[in-house]
Amino acid sequence: MNKEARVQFVINTLKELYPTIPVPLDHKDPYTLLIAVLLSAQCTDVRVNQITPLLFAKADNPYDMVKMSVEEIKEIIRPCGLSPMKSKGIHGLSEILIEKHNGEVPQSFEALEELPAVGHKTASVVMSQAFGVPAFPVDTHIHRLMYRWNLSNGKNVAQTEKDAKRLFPKALWNDLHLQIIWYGREYSPARGWSLEKDIITKTIGKKSIIEAMS
């Protein structure tokens, strides 16, 4: 199977498995999504979805968020890990949204990436899920699977993102990045992985990986 056929196989299989695609992080608008994505760094989405209702009950917009102290935010989000950095980031970006953007989440990669604690991946998730702008945020699942599927060399996430954008049609990026995440969790996890269940890797995966698993 050449690369084009392998890419098409991935698209077709994922579409079959996930015709409707749930969004992993609970949110109601761009601001709550931004905060949820920021909290998800090195934390599971399940844990984030347990914590955000507690935080958003007190502050689900930047104006209420800046009324809280960094310490108060930190106490609530502690179970998500990295709470000193994340609480400062949430408070700081809320101030900037009020000062610079009329309390709204900006709709550009540049403006988002200027916010404290917001990196390229977070900006990409917000652009794609809140505003429908084509983006391909690469998390650990996508990074792992692009390598297993022999579609990227696995050197770093920036390279994986470049490869994904080059190989997959732009119109499908927003769906695909979510479909790959769900697939990674269900069929191709980092640990406790069964090649039998993992139809995509079994069909198109890197020879060395398949041989190591056989």
Image (tube, helix red, strand yellow):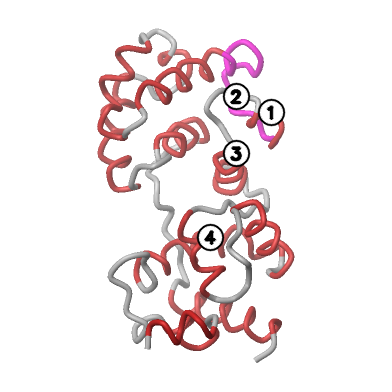
Specify whether 187 is left or right of 13.
left
Classify 10 Å Cα crowding around label 1: few (below 14), some (14-19), many (20 and above). some
Disc 2 marks a residue whose amino acid type is Leu
How many numbered badges does the structure rendering display? 4
**Callout 3 crowding tier (Cα within 10 Å): few <14, some 14–19, many ≥20:** many
Within 10 Å of disc 2 (Cα), the crowding (few <14, some 14-19, many 20+) is: some
**Residue 43 position (above or below residue 210):** above
Q: Mark 4 and mark 3 in contact (Cβ < 8 Å)?
A: no
Q: Which mark is residue 143?
A: 4
- How far apart are the alpha carbons under marks 3 and 2? 9 Å
Please name the residue that numbered disc 3 is placed on.
123
The tag earlier along the polypeptide, 3 or 2, is 2
Label 2 sits on residue: 115
Start and end of the magenta stretch? Answer: 96-108
Secondary structure under the numbered disc 4 in the rendered image: helix
Q: Secondary structure at mark 3?
A: helix
